[in-house]
Image (spheres, coloured by chain):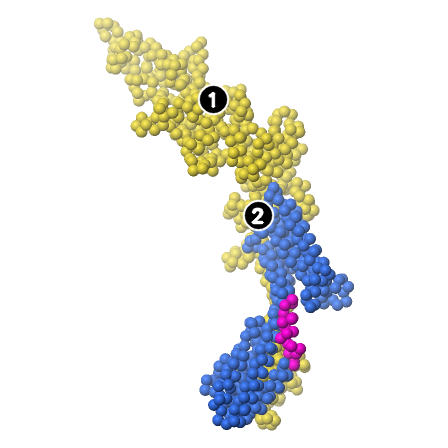
Amino acid sequence: MQSKGLLTHGGRFYLWWALLLSVASLFLYYTQGPTGLQPPNGGTWQGYTLGAIGACLIVWLSLLGIRKRRYSSRIGTVAGWASAHVYLGLALLVVATLHCAWQFGWNVHTLAYALMCGVIVSGLYGLFVYLRLPQVQSQNRAGKNREAWLDELRSIDMDIQSVAAKADADTQTMSLSAQSLTAIGKSIWAQLWGLDRSRVNLPVRGLVANTDQAAVIAYLARHIPSARTRREAEVLNELLDLFGRRKVLLSRMREDLRLGAHLKIWLFFHVPLTLALLVALCIHVVVVFFYW
Amino acid sequence: MEFLVRQTIGSANAETVDSSVTGKRLSLGPAAKDDVLLPGLNSSVVIVVKDSQSAWVRSGARNLMFDGVLKKRVLLNRGDTLEISGLTLSLFSPPSGFDLGILLSGSIDPVDNLMTIMRTPAVPWSMRRMSWFLMCVVALMSFVLPYYALQDPNLEDVVVSAGFPSDVHWSSGPLSSAHLAAGIAEQCDACHVQPFVMTQDDACLDCHKTLNEHADVNFHADLGLETMRCASCHREHNEPSTVIAQTDRLCTDCHVDSESWDVSGAHPVIPVTAFAPNQHPEFKVAVLDEAHAAAWPVWRREPLLSSEAVDKSGLKFDHQVHLNVDKVADEVSGDGLECSSCHTLTPDRSSFEPVNMQAHCESCHSLAFDPMTPDFELPHASAREAYTVIEGHYLRTFLAATPADPKTDRRRLGSPSDYRSVCTDDPYTCAQWEAQREARYQFEDTGCVTCHEVSNNNNIDIAKRYKVRPVYQTQDWYMSAKFDHRPHEVIDGRSGDEVCGDCHDANTSASSSDVLMPGIDLCFDCHNADLQIEGAECVSCHWFHPDDGARSVLARGGRRGGNPNADAWIFKWLTP
């Protein structure tokens, strides 16, 4: 709910500021007009003005990272800063595009623009995940957290080990291998896409993929009807039940990991791109006047 | 290095199994390549001996629990304990022959393993490292490398040939096609001579040496034309390219109230606000100023619709007759003349090459004058030269005639027999008589006088009596404008004489004094600023820098560029 306040903070005060800035920038841009000595570009007085506004905006937007860590600061609330960050960050796209007047090229100036777009796009994605994913994550967790899941998983695994001890050697080996070869998002891609690269050592077939514990569950389900004794069938049934619970638990953990990765990954691009943008912005300003 | 690895086994870790490994380092992990196989570990752990008491332990994942913190690298001393996914790792004093003793106890807990993974950041690099990396790449490639390449030509060659960015990538936009030349296109300092200083006029005038100021800088000293920086108007690195400013404001800002200018009546400048009806003065055409014509041709401008607009070329020519196929046609094909039979466009297609006697007239208007010698022609030269040739011809003719008949004592002219009937006096007298007769014919009746204006001073010797008026063909009818025939050669699918006739009404012109130039209203049909039709900009027809006048290179000589005051306020503010 707090994340939604990002947009509605202060009666969308900064939305109106951002719109006002965009409209003023458009007005300034069109005063360059078709009757000028030159087409609209960053070198007219309007272009310089838009560029100066854009540069100040970039620097100020970057300061959010500092402001949110200064808990004692009284320069506005963090929520207000974040709301302004979102709206004025979007207005920056308008200001900067009008500053360069849609003139792009293979040069340091367009590099700065591209980095700025990268920052804004990653920020937009961040905004999207902050608005959408916490709710999904909360539903997935159903009041639990990762530590509780791990405790539950440990408990299930101990049960599996004690039940499997009553089964034949093949079933024991399979059960233990299913546990030790369980994988949760080792790589960034596995985390972002919730990939399950678990494996299991099945009797006869050897190592096979065990996505969603499907291979081990299928093995157990297939062997219950052919159990030679009632006790063996009960053991297999218990294992089937435990692996079913394990599957559900692992799915939730994997989903939690996926949502967490999406909540963090954008910042991994947003912050470094912002710092690279600040460097590119300085270079842009310096070389514009170097070759004036 | 000799490693002794001791692993506890059994439910109470009561028993141990020793194994020795030789190598620079020891690796523990789930892969077959690892020295000690530990299934279930999510990444390999490498141990490197520091000294007999300690070793570096490094893992592919942040799963080394040391002092309650998960790390990727740990310096483990003897007596320390390290936990890896439920497995405990410590060092012990090995027996002689071994460099390091490693004790592994406990077993790998799959759940601990998962816990480690879930606590591990999703990305391979920290945000800080990623930030530094990107900042360094941007700074290096965008500034540091191009800057140092700029200082060192050898380094620049290496940078450019390797495909790395150079100062060319500092350019904010493409150059106009005129400046895409060797020595300019990729040589930024050809124009940007001094860093952090605006492009100076010297850089422009180094190449544009023949450029003239817009007006006489002395007469219009108050305008300070020569103090305006070239780059105030000629802007580069823009899309679309505007190195030649197209805006009418460039002209109309001043010319809108030109009536108020103090020009002392010398050169009245008519106000103009746009190329549209009632906003642009009537065209003026070039008229030969006869007061000067005797010495050298001087043209002045007269309104096209005034009585002064007369073609005073000195030629007599009837377009109406020449374009009438019933009167002038090719003897063989029967085809009539076309405009292009006599008028050839100049290479820049702005005007036409002068009409030439030899190329355009002589095929019909032969200069042969003696029917007895049709191959012998008069020179297309002055009247005196022509008379000299006529006189010489007849002297040779009569002297070559047969001697006088003794019976009659009359000089026989011999063949052709016609000469016998012409003159019976001595050859000199006959030749003079015949030459004078031919001269009168050429200069008074028909011949030279057909096409040329000839004056006759009867009081002096016949050799000097006739004067053919020099021919001055006007090529540049609109002296203050330029016209490109190229886009006008085909209009609505029509071409040739049909299109020529749209603007030049030659079919009805019976006199060479007619000025066959179109008026402004005809141009308005296709070019009209009021209707926002393309090609109505001032610079579509006019040059800002005239062909003659004050040379910019002299007017601005010794100056380091123009006047910053001529630029926008931002330049004033930013000028160091």
Taking depth in this image into account, of B124 and B507 the one nearest to the observer is: B507
Q: Quadrant of residue A139?
A: bottom right
Outermost residue toward the top in this view: B408
Q: Which mark is residue B228?
A: none
**Residue B70 in view (yes/no):** no
**Residue A34 in view (yes/no):** yes
Instruction: Give the chain of mark 2.
Output: B
Residue at left offset 41%, top offset 27%? B356
Of helix, strand and loop, which one carries label 1? loop
Image position, residue A46 (x, y; %): 65, 48
Q: Which mark is residue B513?
A: 1
Taking depth in this image into account, of A164 and B257 the one nearest to the observer is: A164
Per the rendering, the colour in which chain B appears is yellow
Tags 1 and 2 on a common chain:
yes
Instruction: Give the chain of mark 1.
Output: B
Q: Amino acid at mark 1?
A: Ser
Per the rendering, the colour in which chain A appears is blue
Of helix, strand and loop, which one carries label 2? loop
Mainly helix, strand or loop, the magenta region? helix
Classify 10 Å Cα crowding around label 2: few (below 14), some (14-19), many (20 and above).
many
Q: Amino acid at mark 2?
A: Asn
Query: Would you name the residue on which mark 2 appears?
Result: B238
Circles 1 and 2: CB distance less than 8 Å? Answer: no
Taking depth in this image into account, of B290 and B280 the one nearest to the observer is: B280
| Magenta region includes residue A147 | yes
Q: Which residues are magenta?
A: A130-148
Taking depth in this image into account, of B188 and B300 the one nearest to the observer is: B300
